[in-house]
Amino acid sequence: AEAQPGEHEVVLGPSAVATLVAYLASTCGARSVLEGESFLAAGRGRRVAAPAVTVADDAAHPASIGIAFDLQGVPRRRVGLIERGVAGEPVTDLHTAARLGLRPTGHATATARLGPQAANPVLEPGDASLDELVAAVDDGLFVTRFHYVNLLDRSRALLTGMTRDGVFRIRRGEIAEPVRNLRFAQGAVDALASVAGVGRELVTAGPRYGTYGSTAAPALRVGGFSFTSVTTH
């Protein structure tokens, strides 16, 4: 079966959510903020996501696999990138913290080109089971995970990619037939703004690139997710 391209209500499995969060967090370094290539560049305190959404970089979180200090020897501290839907702080190293007038957060990397990077983003869990998230959708899609994901616009965390490993129609609150994979073009921040339910089970994924770090995320019910075309398989 095929689902028509367009905007659909979706339930994203934890692996799919972890991909969105990892790419979102990659735009939250202080260098990206200084260069205007982050949603945080417009300043802290703006509501950018649903109130149920908190995303923090936190190497000490029980679901994280992280290192306690950065390459400058600064202890890593928890940084609220989005706190209850409100834009928070970027991660910093000694140099960018001084430029921004912020306290260093312990996120230095080995290259000045990249600047500080979030290594352990966590989207805090809610209180819904996966079945409850699905049951709240009358007509939508369940997406297991994404791949071939790329950033189209860092300032908006606009992503493109494909679904994989199972997309299913949700009909009247139940998983129905499988559908073909879809290509998508969706802003990660915009997706978090339309979150209508947050799962209670955190799943930890390995780093998107590099050799250390992790991303932890639950399933989400998202009110609107934009798919651009159907794939051939």
Image (cartoon, rainbow, N blue to C red):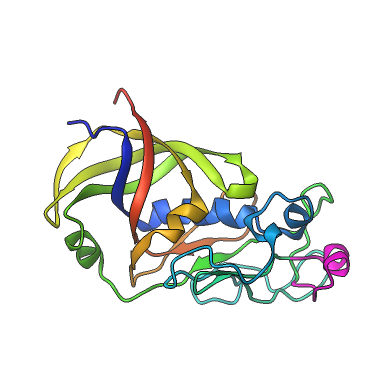
Q: Is residue 100 above or below residue 113?
A: below
Within the image, what quadrant is residue 222 found in?
Answer: bottom left
The quarter of the image holding the N terminus is top left
Considering every residue shown, the one lying at the far top of the view is 232
Q: Is residue 138 above or below residue 3?
A: below
The magenta segment is 92-105
Within the image, what quadrant is residue 191 found in?
Answer: bottom left
Query: Residue 179, percent across and down?
Result: 22, 36
Question: For residue 100: magenta?
Answer: yes
Say left or right for 34 vs 119. Answer: right
Decide which of 187, 111 is in the foreground and name it.
187
Decide if residue 105 is in sight here.
yes
Query: Residue 176, percent across and down?
Result: 13, 46
Q: Is residue 141 above or below residue 106?
A: above
Query: Residue 107, percent across and down?
Result: 74, 65
Say left or right for 97 vs 2. Answer: right
Residue at image position (52%, 61%) is 215
Question: For residue 186: magenta?
Answer: no
Residue at image position (29%, 26%) is 233
Residue at image position (71%, 65%) is 91
Decide if residue 207 is in sight here.
no
Query: Residue 17, percent across and down?
Result: 42, 55
Q: How many marks?
A: 0
